[in-house]
Image (tube, grey):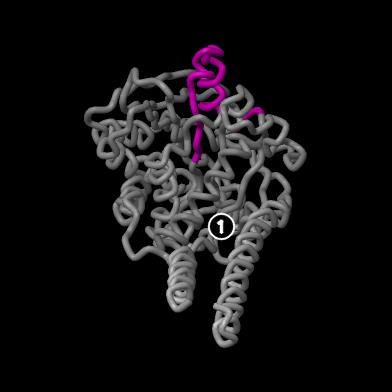
Amino acid sequence: MRKRIVALFAILFLMHSTVSVVGQDTEETPANCLLNFDGELANQSVKFQTDLGPRTPGSAASSALRDSIKSNLTGWDITETTHHSHGMTLTNLFATWNKGAGSNVILAAHYDTRHKGDQDWNESRRGEPIDGANDGASGVAVLLEMARLIPTLNLTHEVTLFFTDGEDQGDNHSTYVLGAKAWADNLTQSDADSIESFILVDMVGDAYLTLRKTTPGNEELWNRTEDIIKYIDDVCEINDSSYFDFEKIDGIYDDHVPAHELGIPAIDIIDTRYGENATFLGGHWHTHNDTADKVSAESLQKVGLILELGLINGAWLDVRESNIDTEEDITDPCLQGSDNESPECTLDSAEKSGSEDANDMIVGVFVALCIILVWANLAWLVFADNRGEG
């Protein structure tokens, strides 16, 4: 009898230990949490770019920036394409790592800056070009820091950094994203099908970073991005994920749209509220306040870590084979504006989190029933032993 009691106590101890281990975080840092994106280096790039002056298409500052980008991409396969649109000469710049390896992932940002500060409080300056520290330089800075890291990641697929021109020169859909449109217009269907994903970063340096999902965009890519953000917070314990609103989405017309329209899985990581308590496409957006002092190394790092971990974990690959119906993409119902100003939309995440809560509850109930059963058997054995029946 005593042996049976000892065995039951051993089972209880093992069950308690197992439950404790499941409920505790491991003290060892996971290998994929050893991330190296440097927000300070990215922020230095923002300052360098704004010191060049406004980088409008065809300007000396635009050319100087392209030369600087190319000089910092040793070992990359670099190409440029030039085209003419709406009276402008535009130049797209591409840099590819692992050229020829296939399964191309594109990380994109526009390097041009707006030719006029049309939202500025000072009406007399609304016709002057802006510095574009956040709206232009921040995305480029993130890509350049990724360029420093990608050769160290031992990737077996292609990664292309796409610096688009002519994104921010228009006043409506027909005159925005001109560089991205020209690129998409010259892709064959085979070229488009070979692209695994298109991740755009735009206006990501705001010191008061507030990100949301954006539409149009690929739902599976957004789900994976959310998972990355939560992983960096919960597992890596690097960033507090409160900078991302998991329940709402914004409609935005940006450089990812031409890719999305070709069936390429694409999303736009963008902060549409620039400045403290800014409204949708308000604050410093398209004003002369879009200067380097409004950009934060911490914000740049938060976004950079998303891209870095996504590459390390393969999150940007095999999106088309994810069994996500194309009708489930976040698409046009929320995108109703005539230009790139579009209404914000709300996405209810209760249904998504409900299934996770249900699974946790089932596991908890099962463990509780097992413990009750073991204790009941133990009590019966003790009772039987006292009666001499054991």
Q: Is residue 17 left or right of residue 39?
A: right
Q: Give the image location of residue 186, x and y in percent.
A: 52, 14
Q: Does 99 appear above or below 374? A: above
Tag 1: Cα neighbours inside 10 Å, few (<14), some, or many (≥20)?
some
Highlighted magenta segment, given as a residue range? 174-200
Measuring 45% from the left and 31% from the top, which residue is drawn there? 106
Q: Is residue 10 magenta?
A: no
Measuring 29% from the left and 39% from the top, which residue is drawn there? 153
Q: Give the image location of residue 263, x and y in percent.
A: 61, 24
Asked if residue 112 can be seen in this view, the reply is no
* Residue 55 picture quarter: top left
Q: Is residue 189 magenta?
A: yes
Q: Nearer the viewer, residue 2 or 22?
A: 2
Instruction: Write down the residue under mark 1.
Output: 244
Q: Is residue 335 left or right of residue 258?
A: right
Q: Does 363 appear above or below 180? A: below
Q: Give the image location of residue 56, x and y in percent.
A: 45, 36
Label 1 secondary element: strand
Q: Nearer the viewer, residue 366 or 335?
A: 366
Tell me how many marks there are.
1
Residue type for callout 1:
Phe
Measuring 44% from the left and 30% from the top, which residue is drawn there? 105
Measuring 38% from the left and 45% from the top, which residue is drawn there? 308
Asked if residue 40 can be seen in this view, the reply is yes
